[in-house]
Image (cartoon, rainbow, N blue to C red):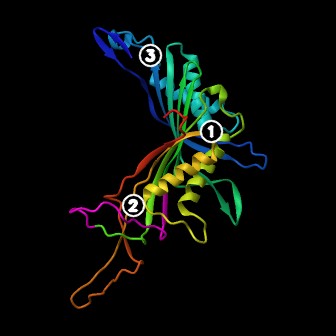
Amino acid sequence: MAAGGGLRVEQRHGKARVRVGRVWRQGADGSHHFVEWNVSISLLSHCLSSYHRDDNSDIVATDTMKNTVYVKAKECGDRLSVEEFAILLGNHFCSFYPQVYTAIVNIIEKPWERVCIDGKPHLHGFKLGSENHTVEATVQKSGALTLTSGVAGLALLKTTQSGFEKFVRDKYTILPDTRERMLATEVNASWRYSYESVASIPKKELYFSEKFMEVKKVLMDTFFGPPETGVYSPSVQRTLYLMGSAVLRRFPDVASIHLKMPNIHFLPVNLSTKENPSMVKFKDDVYLPTDEPHGSIEATLSRITSKM
C-alpha cells in the first residue's frame, strides 16, 4: 500500500493459468514420472510509477513470469513436489527482482495416476483421476513463508451410517428426523503448515507429496470408519470436525485446516398412481441424485497456539 497524488494505492500484478507439464525419465527401473500444473503468480512490488506516471521501468512483465515458469520447470532435473515448485518460484521472484517484496504462487496439480496393466504398474502410462492437489505459497523477500496445501473435489459417499435429528423446528420446517440416510459430499480441504521460512521446510525428497497422500487418507478414513462396520455420522458438522481434528492430531506440522463439505442430497423416490399406489415404494433403495440446492457446511480448525 502506498499513497500518491492524494490517493492510496493497493496493487499487485501477475500471470494466471500458466499450464505446464513436466516429465522425469530417470527412474531406476526405466519408469517415467509426470505432473501437470496450472500456475498463477501474483507479485507485490514497488512499481507505483507505472500507475502515477508513464513509467513502466519497475514492472516485471507478466509474459516474463510465464516464461519463468517453463524455465524453472526445465531446471528441475530431479522430481519435486508441487509445494517445492511453488516455493522455488516465489523465492526466485523475490530474490531476482529488487522491487518485488512478496510473491504469491498458487498451483493446481491435476491428478494423473500411473496405470496398471495385468496387475503391473506401467512404466509410462497414466490416467486422469478425480480430485486436485492445490498449493498456495506466499514468499517474502526476507525468506518468510506461508504455505498451504489442499485437496479439491474429493467426492465421498456412504449409503448408510448417517442421520440428522433433533434440529431446530419451526413453522417453516418440513424435514423429518432420520437415523438412516445416504451421506454424500465433495470435500474441499486446505491445511496450513507451521513452517514460517523457506529455510525451515523439510529437506526430505517429495516430503509434501507424501504428506498430501497421508492427509487425504486420514480425511477419508475418518469419514468412512472401519471397513466392516463404518462409523455413524449424526451430522455433516460432526463428521467435518472429526475429520479436521484427526488431521491435526496426526500431523504436528499442520497448524490449521479448513474444510468445506456441501451436503449433496440423494432424495428418496416414491412413485404412485391411482391404479398402482405403490409403483415405487422407497425402501432405502432408489434415490434421485441432486446437486442443487445443497447444504453448505464449512469450518476452520486450528491449534490454540497457531496463527489463523
Q: How far apart are marks 1 and 3 (CA)?
A: 36 Å
**Relative to residue 267, is residue 78 depicted above or below?**
above
Prevailing secondary structure of the magenta residues: loop
Place of residue 141 in the rendered image (x, y in percent of width and height, measured from the top left): 55, 18
Q: Mark 1 points at which residue?
A: 253
Assess whether residue 167 is covered by the magenta stretch.
yes
Dot 3 amino acid type: Ile
Instruction: Count neighbours of disc 3 (C-alpha within 10 A) and say few if under 14, some if 14 to 19, many if 20 or more.
Output: some
Q: Mark 3 points at which residue?
A: 59
Instruction: Count neighbours of disc 1 (C-alpha within 10 A) and say few if under 14, some if 14 to 19, many if 20 or more.
Output: few
Dot 1 amino acid type: Asp
Q: In this view, does 228 lie to the left or right of 205?
A: left
- Residue in front for this viewpoint, 94 or 200: 200
Tag in front: 1 or 3: 1
- Say whether residue 72 is visible: yes
Q: Is residue 110 left or right of residue 250?
A: left
The label on residue 264 is: 2
Question: In which quadrant of the rendered view does residue 70 lie?
Answer: top right
Give the SS element for disc 3: loop
Magenta stretch in the rendered image: 155-174
Which tag, 3 or 2, sits closer to the chain's start? Answer: 3
Place of residue 191 in the rendered image (x, y in percent of width and height, measured from the top left): 53, 42
Place of residue 245 in the rendered image (x, y in percent of width and height, measured from the top left): 55, 49
Name the residue at 54% across, 66% down. Answer: 231
CB atoms of marks 1 and 3 within 8 Å? no
- Say whether residue 111 is visible: no
**Relative to residue 221, is residue 285 depicted above or below?**
below
Question: In which quadrant of the rendered view does residue 16 lie?
Answer: top left
